[in-house]
Image (spheres, rainbow, N blue to C red):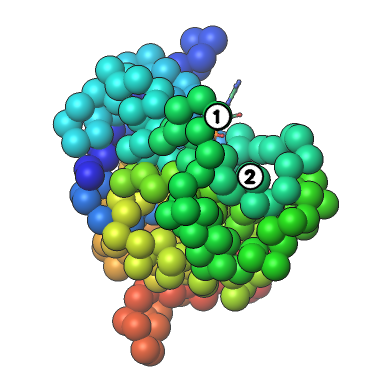
């Protein structure tokens, strides 16, 4: 399933937070949305998962306007793990993950055996099986983040949008999550801050700055020293990873001569 943003604009109180953003995520592709703080990444994602209604342009799922789908239809197509995803009630981890099935169930219909296996298997993939009966509110930030990803996967969407899904994870779980996304076959739009991980995990990067798309392309095309200086205001050398060939950035502290 393809995801397209066609001229998506979001303005609030006379300020345009996202301006005419067009990008296409092909079926099974992983696209990284990157950019400085406040550049509009989360706002753009909120327009995709319908937390915000764009003030201009459209979000298309397989060329159908997302806004024309019922919420249940769009939740079957698209799942989100976002900065807004929170669980305030003290459900167990297993209960929270099982909530991902809600768009597929009617009323209080219990989970089928296949769905229970899906919940158990997904918890194992996210390394949270041992936490199944713990209260969600007792978890660490990284554990909770993995629960929210599991809930999104249990939804069995075709498209996954994630806003900084790795920001609380230790390095092993960051790498495991990104490789899980790559191997999932899902159409993925993911906001990442770590450009080295983004280069390793994404087919293409889209770069936002001040609400506008300022570059898009393969990590090798986008991540150049000049571009990093212009958009992020940082000094970095770009080298190739000796095993994977991915561009990797070696940063230089601003105070370094
Ligand atoms: N509800 C709101 N009211 C007012 N301003 C907002 C609102 N939501 C976002 N903004 C502003 O819009 C701009 C873009 O915010 P957004 O959260 O989309 O950026 P971001 O690229 O995700 O940033 P970060 O990397 O810091 O998470 C910021 O200047 C932010 O302060």
Q: Residues within 10 Å of mark 2 (few under 14, many from 20)?
A: many
Q: Nearer the viewer, mark 1 or mark 2?
A: 1
Seen at 39% across and 83% down, the residue is 241
Foreground residue, 235 or 186? 186
Q: Residues within 10 Å of mark 1 (few under 14, many from 20)?
A: few
Q: Residue furthest bottom?
A: 242
Determine which of the numbered discs, if any, sits on residue 108 in the image: 1
Residue 161 in the image: above or below residue 185: above
* Residue 253 can be seen in this image: no
Percent from the top left, x then y, of residue 229? 46, 57
Q: Quadrant of the N terminus?
A: top left
Foreground residue, 142 or 239? 142
Residue 146 in the image: above or below residue 21: below
Residue that numbered label 2 is attached to: 96
Q: Secondary structure at mark 2?
A: helix
Foreground residue, 233 or 1? 1
């Amino acid at each position: 399933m393809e995801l397209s943003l066609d001229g998506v604009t979001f303005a609030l109180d006379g300020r345009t937070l996202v301006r005419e953003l067009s990008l296409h995520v092909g079926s099974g592709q992983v696209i990284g949305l990157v950019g400085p703080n406040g550049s509009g990444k989360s706002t753009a994602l909120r327009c995709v998962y319908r937390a915000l209604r764009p003030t201009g342009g459209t979000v298309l799922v397989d060329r159908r306007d997302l806004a024309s789908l019922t919420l249940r239809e769009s939740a079957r197509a698209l799942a989100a793990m976002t900065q807004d995803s929170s669980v305030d009630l003290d459900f167990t981890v297993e209960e929270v993950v099982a909530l991902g099935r809600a768009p597929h169930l009617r009323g209080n219909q219990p989970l089928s055996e296949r769905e229970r296996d899906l919940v158990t298997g997904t918890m194992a993939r996210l390394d949270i099986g041992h936490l199944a009966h713990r209260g969600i509110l007792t978890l660490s930030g990284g554990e909770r983040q993995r629960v929210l990803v599991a809930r999104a996967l249990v939804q069995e969407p075709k498209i996954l949008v994630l806003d900084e899904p790795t920001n609380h994870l230790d390095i092993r779980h960051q790498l495991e999550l990104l490789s899980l996304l790559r191997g999932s076959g899902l159409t993925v739009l993911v906001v990442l801050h770590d450009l080295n991980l983004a280069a390793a995990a994404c087919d293409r990067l889209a770069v936002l700055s001040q609400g506008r798309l300022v570059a898009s392309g393969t990590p090798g095309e986008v991540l150049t020293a000049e571009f990093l200086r212009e958009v992020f205001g940082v000094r970095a050398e770009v080298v190739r990873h000796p095993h994977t060939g991915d561009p990797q950035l070696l940063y230089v502290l601003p105070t370094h001569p």
